[in-house]
Image (tube, coloured by chain):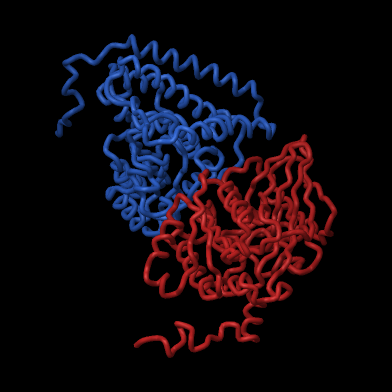
Amino acid sequence: MSRPPLTVGIIPNPASGRDLRRLTANAGLFSSTDKASVVQRLLGAFGATGVERVLLPTDMTGIAAAVLKASRGRHARDNRWPELEILDIRLRQTVEDTRLAARLMAERGVALIAVLGGDGTHKAVAAEVGDIPLLTLSTGTNNAFPELREATGAGLAGGLFAAGRIPPEIALRRNKRLLVREARRGLCEWALVDVAVSPLRFVGGRAISRAEDLAEVFVTFAEPHAIGLSALCGLWCPVSRQAPEGAWMRLHPEARDALLAPLAPGLLQGCGVVAAGTLEPGVPHAPSLSGGTLALDGEREIAFAAGDRPTVTLDSHGPLSIDVEATLAYAARHRLLSIGREHPQHPVNLSC
Amino acid sequence: MTTHLSAEQLLHAYRVMRTIRVFEERLHIEFATGEIPGFVHLYAGEEASAAGVMAHLRDDDCISSNHRGHGHCIAKGVDVHGMMAEIYGKKTGVCQGKGGSMHIADLSKGMLGANGIVGAGAPLVAGAALAAKLKGTDAVAVAFFGDGASNEGAVFEAMNLAAIMNLPCIFVAENNGYAEATASNWSVSCDHIADRAAGFGMPGVTVDGFDFFAVHEAAGAAVARARAGEGPSLIEVKLTRYYGHFEGDAQTYRDMDELKEMREVRDCLKQFRDHTVAAGLLDISQLDDIDGEVERQIEDSVIKAKSDPKPPAADLLADVYVSYP
């Protein structure tokens, strides 16, 4: 029996990178044209490292169409792109499209899923795919979970891992997560970076851009160079991705201490810090407000009122992700990208 | 940017959206009787866009609309009976019955007019914004147009002028997915209409047009920017129309299942009721009272419009030519 082709998935979120923060801050634009280019860079890197088939979902904005068109061109042939299979899903143009694509890829047994989006997109995929590793690429606005990284190098790392050439203990990183539960409503949602409690009553434009709209922040990790809500803890009580604990901070405009933090690109806000501390794993925390909204990974998603009892709990069962730096360092040490004279791209085979 | 709305503001927004819905659903029925001259294009389903933007505007802020203009007119404060009479072609209409559905205008409310020419409203709004700037007021001007008009040269020219002259303009692209019968995901070359703003050096955002609060927040930021002299913005509002392009459109180009889900799950009025009541900001009875009042208001406007007089033949050339001194 022939073995199945080595398959990986790519999920680009067509909606990421164009919310309100282009008006309220100086956030840039990540167009679908750019996203299609990122997917093509990944295909080049995947093809070079032995990936045989790539699954890509359809979308309404032309990403899959542009990639499909490119996959029939000379560049794709010369660079031995993997076979491209478009997952023709029934689109709803909501986060459900991302979730459905992730589930279908998991059913197909992909070795890896590359995600193009912000923290919210990564969270949506992570909650559906168990221990399938994620190759994280930032194409959103405030991105703390996916690092800003050029896709070609990331694709090489992902491809080498998928092809079994990097030991998992080198390539993979286990991430933390925050679980938001509300028993009465049967809610159990994930966040990978932060959960913020806001006095804003409606989900509305989703983003939070003002200090006064923040009452509390819980984070899985907080890096001092972060952008977004986790930057609050990152610049006050940083905690690494690897540490078992997280952090929390309570905010109020009239607090004695205040911190200047980048809540969105180019948007520095003075935030009153009431208290901050360590978030221990496994301990549920109730929000300090009786009503408002919960923002998961930077976007208001859950409105709650007096009758609701939401909790936020940190644990260490988040997704696996590819550690691109460690993977490529291993690849360099072991010369994994060295090629022999038989390789079509060896200099001796390139015609002038 | 106003994100905290008082109960009074919330009730007003709901009344605006409900008025548009009932007005349009009634026209859907009345048009079928053959009594209404001309074409009508219904705005039902898109109410959150007009209500969310207009919540930030004053009478001295101008808007331009398109062929699907009833919602913009109602939200801008144009008299409902005057609109109904106009659509029936009656003397009591806001344009004395000579404009009809596609040319409703009321300058006292800053409503520069619905417009049958696709994309033609955008340059008018650039002019209104230039006037506000030259007069030194902090008034703004808003162009409402659709995904079809987003491909029109006149719209691009207006955006370019607004950008180079730093005009207090807001371009609101109501993307309902279809330009007449042509799907926008086929006819619009870029992925999101909002992305076109980058070509003119202005910010562009995409918002959920089923959610009043999402539109309200984005429009608040864009209007505040314009009033502060910071220039134009583009807001792409993604929504759907519940009826055909025009009344009588069989909509064979459209999957009716997608519409069913949107009506049942995402409807802007339903969401508004659910969210405001769950948040404890409004009582369901307050909203039900508005529903009853609006039903009666629209019923009265139809009865009155039907019995109102037609413009006499002698009016034919009135308001057509301006006599210059």
Residue that protrudes farthest toward the top in the picture: B307
Q: Is residue A346 placed above or below A228 in the rendered structure?
A: below
Residue at the image position 51 percent from the left and 31 percent from the top: B260
In the image, residue A126 lies at what x, y percent? 66, 56
- What's the colour of chain A in the image? red
Tell me if A175 is positioned left or right of B238 in this view: right
Q: Is residue A296 above or below residue B36?
A: below
Viewer-proximal residue, B210 or B318? Answer: B210
Q: Is residue A334 left or right of residue B49?
A: right
Counting from the top left corner in percent of width and height, residue A151 is at 53, 70
The foreground one among A310 and B19 is A310
Q: Quadrant of the C terminus of chain A?
A: bottom left
In terms of image quadrants, where is residue B201?
bottom left
**Which residue is drawn at the image coordinates 42% and 42% (left, top)?**
B175
Q: Quadrant of the N terminus of chain A?
A: bottom right
Is A323 left or right of A45, judged from the image as shown?
Answer: right
Q: Position of residue A95 (x, y in %)?
A: 58, 48
Coordinates of residue A131 in the picture (x, y in percent):
70, 60
Colour blue, chain? B
Picture quadrant where residue B173 is located: top left
Placement of B195 over or under A328, stated as above or below: above
